[in-house]
């Protein structure tokens, strides 16, 4: 897989021949220095960006050449996202934020509300249904973001530095939630700069200069490149 960009009269390869397979139920961390291509790879995996060259098969379907509308549908149905900055809608309360992906998926209002409340409760937010993001701590906001990411029961959960804005205690709580999701069979892909976060994954993909430099399995996952 390649992802190239034009900068003036030059072509820059953000991804250069990345060959990666992630199996259902696997927990994979992606690490690398700034400019290594890890965020670009996450964007391509999340259908937020397109590969310039190569194939991407998601859940048995080749999504490489889908048009923008079909990509959007696949993204909403098959992928869930957790961001470092939470990306919650300030005007909506906890349950309403969790409902957003279901609204775009056409889920009936009553079903969406029941599912959102169940997910919020599962994330430990049972007493916070009607609180808005500004009334929540960082850890609580990230719990809302995780609940939202699960709203449409995605094939893959993609997380970009999910503990980056959290203190160490709260970060460990969020990582514990991700561990529970993995234990329940969810496929997780996490971009992180923190070796202690990556050490929880089944595999760690180390990237450099747009390429996969090496892959470490759990036994050696804690070692940084």
Image (cartoon, rainbow, N blue to C red):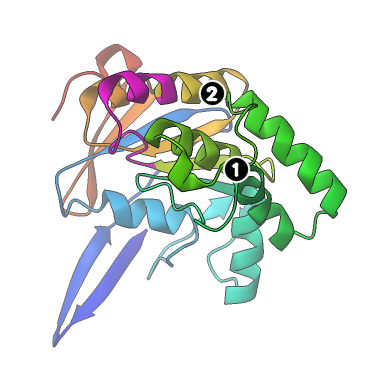
Residue range highlighted in magenta: 160-174
Q: Earlier in the sequence, mark 2 or mark 1?
A: 1
In percent of the image, x 64 and y 41: which residue is there?
130
| Residue 150 appears in the figure | yes
**Badge 2 density bin: few <14, some 14–19, many ≥20, Cα 10 Å:** some
Q: Nearer the viewer, mark 2 or mark 1?
A: 1
Q: Position of residue 149 (x, y in %)?
A: 57, 43
Q: Which mark is residue 94?
A: 1
Q: CA distance from mark 2 to mark 1?
A: 23 Å
Q: How many marks?
A: 2
Q: Secondary structure at mark 1?
A: helix
In percent of the image, x 32 and y 66: which residue is there?
3
In percent of the image, x 55 and y 58: which residue is there?
91
Residue of label 2: 182
In terms of depth relative to the viewer, which is nearer, 2 or 121? Answer: 121
In percent of the image, x 76 and y 38: which residue is there?
115
Quadrant for the C terminus in the image: top left
Q: Position of residue 180 (x, y in %)?
A: 54, 19
Quadrant for the N terminus in the image: bottom left
């Amino acid at each position: 897989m390649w992802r190239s960009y034009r900068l003036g009269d030059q072509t820059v390869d953000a991804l250069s021949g990345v060959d990666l397979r992630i199996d259902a139920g696997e927990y994979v961390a992606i690490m690398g220095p700034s400019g290594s291509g890890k965020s670009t790879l996450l964007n391509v995996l999340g259908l937020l960006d397109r590969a310039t060259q190569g194939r991407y098969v998601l859940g048995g379907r080749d999504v490489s050449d889908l048009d923008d509308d079909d990509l959007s549908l696949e993204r909403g149905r098959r992928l869930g996202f957790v961001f470092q900055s939470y990306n919650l809608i300030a005007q909506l309360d906890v349950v309403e934020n969790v409902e957003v992906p279901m609204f775009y998926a056409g889920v009936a209002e009553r079903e969406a509300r029941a599912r959102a409340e169940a997910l919020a409760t599962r994330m430990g937010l049972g007493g916070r249904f009607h609180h808005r993001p500004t009334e929540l701590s960082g850890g609580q906001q990230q719990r809302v973001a995780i609940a939202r990411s699960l709203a449409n029961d995605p094939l893959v959960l993609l997380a970009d530095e999910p503990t980056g804005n959290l203190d160490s205690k709260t970060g460990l709580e969020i990582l514990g939630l991700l561990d529970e999701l993995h234990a329940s069979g969810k496929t997780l892909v996490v971009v992180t700069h923190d070796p202690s976060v990556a050490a929880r994954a089944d595999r760690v993909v180390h990237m450099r200069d747009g390429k996969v430099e090496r892959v470490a399995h759990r036994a050696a996952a804690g070692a940084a490149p």
